[in-house]
Image (cartoon, rainbow, N blue to C red):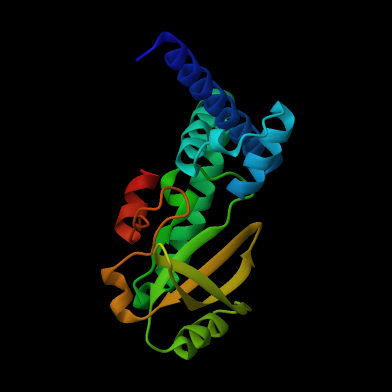
């Protein structure tokens, strides 16, 4: 490979890394939860207009985890423990629906602004809604689009509410939904899910 091409590729890799680091910093310091918004803000700050140089979501999440370890270590650990503890309490409450934790609270990249996202499995959303009402939880009923393939999306019932200072989202899958996870917005792979025992182990 000619030296000029190698230098160009090295420069592009460096710019991509700088964008990922800046996007991660913005997410950590400004509470941005949207990867695309963080990318756009990072590109504007670094004056990069070539979209081919944009890092993917997985690269930004890796940079975010690194930023949290370097600059927010103690506080990040405290926040993550608090979020996971809240998730455990809710999962115990909804044990009959086989709750699984997903997203940044499971992966460890969550911050104080992150939403606790649970997947539950029930063929009647009325049963889930009744359970929430019985425990005094007033949830907003909406829909969540999840992606199973590049061009196949499914709309599922979801319930949003606040538990103290934490935003909660519960997505209701049919019972058979436990067999296949939707694709992650971070890396495009099947979304990681953690059951109650997994999250309890993380708390230890």
User: Residue 139's quadrant in the figure?
Assistant: bottom right
Quarter of the picture holding the C terminus = top left
Vertical order, 159 against 70 (above or below): below
Above or below, comparing residue 142 to residue 181 in the picture? below
| The N terminus sits in image quarter | top left
Q: Residue furthest top?
A: 3
Residue 90 in the image: x percent, y percent? 47, 66
Q: Residue furthest front?
A: 2
Q: Is residue 156 in view?
A: yes
Camera-nearest residue between 1 and 13 = 1
How many numbered badges does the structure rendering display? 0
Locate residue 51, reporting x and y percent.
Answer: 59, 39
Answer with the quarter of the image where residue 49 lies.
top right
Percent x, y of residue 119: 42, 68
Could you tell me residue 135's position as x and y percent?
54, 79
Rendering quarter of residue 100: bottom left
Residue at figure coordinates x 35%, y 55% from the top left: 192
Is residue 104 placed above or below 64 in the rendered structure? below
Q: Residue at x 41, y 48 (%)?
A: 187
Q: Nearer the viewer, residue 68 or 196?
A: 68
For the residue pair 27 and 48, the one nearer the viewer reads as: 48
Q: Say above or below: 140 vs 104.
A: below
Residue 32 appears in view: no
Query: Viewer-proximal residue, 51 or 82?
Result: 51
Q: Which residue shows up at 50% across the image and 18% down it?
A: 8
Q: Residue at x 54, y 39 (%)?
A: 78
């Amino acid at each position: 490979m000619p030296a000029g091409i190698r230098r160009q590729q090295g420069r592009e890799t460096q710019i991509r890394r700088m964008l990922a680091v800046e996007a991660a910093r913005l997410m950590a310091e400004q509470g941005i939860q949207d990867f695309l918004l963080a990318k756009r803000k990072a590109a504007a700050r670094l004056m990069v207009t070539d979209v081919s140089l944009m890092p993917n979501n997985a690269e930004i999440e890796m940079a975010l985890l690194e930023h949290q370890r370097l600059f927010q270590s103690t506080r990040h650990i405290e926040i993550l423990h608090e979020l996971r503890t809240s998730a455990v309490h809710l999962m115990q409450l909804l044990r009959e629906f086989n709750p699984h934790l997903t997203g940044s609270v499971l992966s460890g990249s969550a911050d104080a602004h992150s939403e606790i996202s649970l997947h539950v499995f029930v063929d009647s959303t009325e049963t889930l809604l009744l359970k929430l009402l019985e425990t005094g939880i007033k949830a907003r009923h909406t829909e969540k689009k999840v992606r199973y393939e590049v061009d196949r999306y499914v709309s599922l019932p979801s319930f949003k509410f606040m538990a103290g200072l934490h935003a909660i989202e519960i997505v209701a899958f049919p019972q058979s939904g436990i067999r296949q996870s939707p694709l992650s917005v971070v890396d495009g792979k099947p979304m990681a899910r953690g059951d109650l025992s997994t999250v309890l182990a993380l708390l230890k």
